[in-house]
Image (cartoon, grey):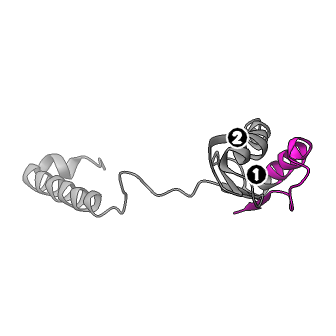
Amino acid sequence: MNISRPFIERPVATTLLMVALMICGVIGYRALPISALPEVDYPTIQVATYYPGASPEVMITAVTAPLERKLGQMPGLTQMASTSSAGASAITLQFDLAISLDVAEQQVQAAINEAGAYLPPGLPSPPFTVR
């Protein structure tokens, strides 16, 4: 028994079957729930620091810059953005998808501890992380 024999003997039925399969394939392809830009949750951690009474310039030079230097050395860091205002500083860190959020948080805490020597001595509380 040859598998291709019935298809060779009935070319019209073979063509109709092929067209039906192509139509089902096109309908199935169009029904796939795939977007052009899928939403991906990157591991993101924010480091916040409060220094009441400090001007934005003091926050940038005395708090944000030393933290950025230490945080920028972490492996797997893909993006870092910071904002400094009167008495507050926030650094947002985005990591590679391959890094677990728990591992990233440990790395961030280690970098904050290293940067502690370069922060102002009058800081009421150390920088803290927010997921």
Q: Amino acid at mark 2?
A: Gly
Left or right side of 52 for 20: left
Name above or below for residue 60 compared with residue 73: below
Q: Position of residue 118 (x, y in %)?
A: 87, 41
Q: Name the residue nearer the viewer: 98 or 77.
A: 77
- Which label sits on residue 124? none
Residues shaded magenta: 106-131
Q: Position of residue 88 (x, y in %)?
A: 70, 57
At 43% across and 55% down in the image, what residue appears?
Answer: 38
Q: Name the residue nearer the viewer: 76 or 54.
A: 54
Q: Name the residue nearer the viewer: 74 or 25.
A: 74
Q: Position of residue 96 (x, y in %)?
A: 64, 45
Left or right side of 96 for 111: right
At 69% across and 63% down in the image, what residue appears?
Answer: 131
Q: Name the residue nearer the viewer: 70 or 16.
A: 70
Which residue is denoted by mark 1 in the rendering? 104
Which residue is denoted by mark 2 in the rendering? 76
Q: Are circles 1 and 2 on residues that touch, CB within 8 Å? A: yes
